[in-house]
Image (spheres, rainbow, N blue to C red):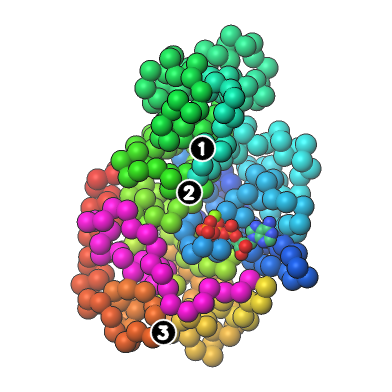
Amino acid sequence: MTMLEKTTTGGPGGGEDDAVLTVDDLRITFSRGGKLIHAVNGLSYTLRRGRMLAIIGESGSGKSVSVRALMGLLPPSAYITGSARLHDIELIGRSDKAMREIRGRDVAMVFQDPARSLNPTMSVGAQITEALRMQSEISRKAAAERAVELLKLVRLPAAERRFHEYPHQLSGGMRQRVMIAIALAGNPKVLIADEATTALDVTTQAQIMELLVDLQERLGTAVILISHDLGLAASYADDVLVMYAGRAVEHAATSTLFRNVRMPYTKALLGAIPQLTTVPHSQLTVIGGQPPDLSALPTGCPFRPRCPKATEKCEEAPPLDEHEPGHWYACWHPVSRDDPALTGGAIDETAPEVAGPPANADTEDASAAADEHEEVVR
Ligand SMILES: Nc1ncnc2c1ncn2[C@@H]1O[C@H](COP(=O)(O)OP(=O)(O)OP(=O)(O)O)[C@@H](O)[C@H]1O
Ligand code: SF4
Ligand SMILES: [Mg+2]
């Protein structure tokens, strides 16, 4: 296949040999109050060994539901089709029992709220030891030793002492480190962090992100980072996938995407790009217009009702194609560098057509931002 031929499960950063997780045409529908809610609508991507993929998108775009499906954590009301292969193992359609064998050992997840995920009546050491003994047949003593090793790996200060402490005795950042240690107990190939640092202060957030990057590099774990924080995605992720209405609309290496945004929705979301270097924690911009009703999606491009570039052509759904090497996007009229209608901020249907700095300044700032982030982080 040539570089620019259509691919549905593409993703930047290496050959097929590196693929750890291949998600192909994943669709998830809930039945609620007599309506069908189409939460995920043909999501496809490849996650590669040792890489961090940030999934970003507005609230309700299907980020959490799509990763919970990989873990077998959706309620029975979810109807799931498509495929998600972890190496050769198909994750979709497995029984609960079969999924329990995968969960923790092959794919593990860290959630936003460690206080609720940890058992308040057990010491953190006992909780990690239990997780280890669920994953493999080892003695209690060996598991306890490994638990202390894991606490050191996640850089918990005074690991031996903390082993005996209870969750309420630890700070929020320490509890999140314990959750990561539990997630690592099974030596997973994929670690999913869903808003895992959102509840933490900015300094602790950065420390946890650096820990994830360190683990990714040392253990070769592939990481999926779900976050509303563009600064985190720009600073730490290797690749970024933008979701809208349950599908991927743009996907590229982080530096490529931030230098050369092509999809109007991404452009609107990243209205704050020029400030990324000065404001390392930038939330996604609020976009004008209504988010899509997932029970009544429009035909064609789902962003059409909010997109100032929409034409009749957009009544036909644009495929997610690799239009430029390593850069996938789904749009009939991609944003160009000198496109005056979409520079410098959110798309707001009530706002004047040209908002913010001129096109070139925006693009150059974005490139500089991406470069600086690369230098700092890599
Ligand atoms: N159990 C459920 N039953 C019905 N609908 C659901 C269920 N879980 C999620 N949904 C719907 O699926 C859609 C996607 O939800 P999801 O939690 O994946 O969004 P998200 O992108 O993670 O948003 P956020 O950024 O707010 O976390 C939402 O419209 C949500 O209401
Ligand atoms: S396909 Fe059309 S409606 Fe969709 S983002 Fe591109 S220009 Fe806008
Ligand atoms: Mg979510």
User: In the rendered image of this protein, does residue 296 appear above or below residue 158?
Assistant: below
Q: How busy is the neighbourhood of tag 2: few (under 14 within 10 Å), some, or many (20 plus)?
A: some
Front disc: 2 or 1: 1
Give percent across and percent down for residue 355. Answer: 28, 80
**Is residue 48 something one can see in this rendering?**
no
Give percent across and percent down for residue 30. Answer: 72, 62
The residue positioned farthest toward the bottom in the image shown: 312
Start and end of the magenta stretch? Answer: 266-294
Q: Which residue is mark 3?
A: 349
Q: Which residue is mark 1?
A: 114
**Could you say which is closer to the camera, residue 313 or residue 5?**
313
Precedes in sequence: disc 2 or disc 1: 1
User: In the rendered image of this protein, does residue 203 appear above or below residue 301?
Assistant: above
Horizontal side of 31 relative to 21 (left or right) equals right
Amino acid on which the number 3 mark rests in the picture:
Glu
Amino acid on which the number 1 mark rests in the picture:
Pro
State whether label 2 is within 8 Å of ligand 3.
Answer: yes
Q: How busy is the neighbourhood of tag 1: few (under 14 within 10 Å), some, or many (20 plus)?
A: many
**Is residue 118 something one can see in this rendering?**
yes
Query: Residue at coordinates 51% horizontally, 37% vertically from top-left?
Result: 114
Precedes in sequence: disc 1 or disc 3: 1
Q: Which residue is mark 2?
A: 195
Separation (CA) of disc 2 from disc 3: 29 Å
Query: Residue at coordinates 75% horizontally, 64% vertically from top-left?
Result: 31
Query: Residue at coordinates 74% horizontally, 71% vertically from top-left?
Result: 35
Precedes in sequence: disc 2 or disc 3: 2
Dot 3: element? loop
